[in-house]
C-alpha cells in the first residue's frame, strides 16, 4: 500500500464523474467509484489515464513507462483481462480474481501471489521495466491490479471487448492520456 495508495489516490481522484457510482469506501480510495457510461467504453480507465477530466493521469504522474503502462502490457501479454483472471483461477486464487470483477469490495493480493501466478521470469522483466527489485515490482503490481481490473469490468463481468479495452487504454497512456 503506502506509496502506491498515494499515487493511485492522486490518479483516481478524478475518477468520479457524473453518472459514476460510489464504491463506499475502499481504503485509500475515498470518493472513487465504479465508473459506468460516458467513458468511451473504458469503464472508468479514461479517468485513471487522465483523459476524463480532473485527474492528473498516469502519464503525468509516473511517465509513460510507469506502473500503469507496465500493468497494461502485462494484461496484453497474458491474454487480456480474461486471460489474467483465468491464470489466477487456475493457481487457486479465483475468489480474489472474481471479487475484482464483481460489484463490491475487491479482495487484495500480495506480491507473493502475483509471483506465483505470473512466474519469476515475467516478474523479472516487469521489475527491469520499472527499475526496481522483483519484490517491489510484484508488490506494486499486486496492489494496483485489482483496481485496474475493477475499472475495466464496470458491469460486473468481463466485457466481450476486454482485449480492445486494454489496447485502447495502453494507446491512451502512450498519448499522454489524450
Image (spheres, rainbow, N blue to C red):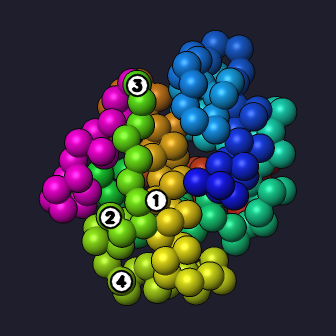
Q: Quadrant of the N terminus?
A: bottom right
Q: Which residue is mark 1?
A: 142
In the rendered view, does 69 fall on the left or right side of 10? left
Residues tagged 4 and 2 counted as in contact (Cβ below 8 A): no
* Crowd band around label 3 with a 10 angstrom C-alpha radius: few (<14), some (14–19), many (20+): some
Residue appearing at x 76%, y 32% in the figure: 14
> Closer to the N terminus: mark 4 or mark 1?
4
Q: Which residue is mark 4?
A: 120
In the rendered view, does 35 fall on the left or right side of 118? right
Q: Secondary structure at mark 2?
A: helix
Residues tagged 2 and 1 counted as in contact (Cβ below 8 A): yes
Q: Which residue is mark 3?
A: 104
- Give percent across and percent down for residue 104: 40, 25
Magenta-colored span = 87-103
Rendering quarter of residue 43: top right
Q: Secondary structure at mark 3?
A: loop
Identify which residue, 96 or 55, lies in the foreground: 96
> Could you give the CA–CA distance between mark 2 and mark 1, rounded to whole angstroms?
8 Å
- Label of residue 113 in the image: 2
- Label of residue 155 in the image: none
Amino acid at each position: 500500500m503506502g506509496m502506491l495508495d498515494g499515487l493511485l489516490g492522486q490518479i483516481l481522484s478524478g475518477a468520479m464523474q457524473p453518472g459514476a457510482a460510489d464504491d463506499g469506501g475502499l481504503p485509500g480510495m475515498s470518493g472513487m467509484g465504479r465508473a459506468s457510461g460516458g467513458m468511451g467504453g473504458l469503464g472508468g480507465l479514461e479517468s485513471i489515464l487522465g483523459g476524463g477530466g480532473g485527474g492528473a493521469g498516469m502519464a503525468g504522474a509516473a511517465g509513460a513507462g510507469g506502473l500503469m503502462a507496465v500493468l497494461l502490457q502485462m494484461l496484453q501479454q497474458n491474454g487480456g483481462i480474461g486471460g489474467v483472471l483465468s491464470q489466477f483461477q487456475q493457481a487457486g486464487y479465483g475468489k480474489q480474481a472474481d471479487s475484482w470483477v464483481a460489484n463490491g469490495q475487491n479482495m487484495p493480493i500480495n506480491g507473493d501471489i502475483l509471483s506465483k501466478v505470473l512466474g519469476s521470469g515475467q516478474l523479472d522483466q516487469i521489475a527491469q521495466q520499472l527499475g526496481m527489485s522483483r519484490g517491489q515490482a510484484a508488490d506494486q503490481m499486486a496492489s494496483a491490479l485489482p483496481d485496474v481490473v475493477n475499472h475495466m469490468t464496470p458491469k460486473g463481468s468481463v466485457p466481450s471487448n476486454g482485449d480492445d479495452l486494454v489496447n485502447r487504454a495502453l494507446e491512451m497512456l502512450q498519448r499522454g492520456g489524450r
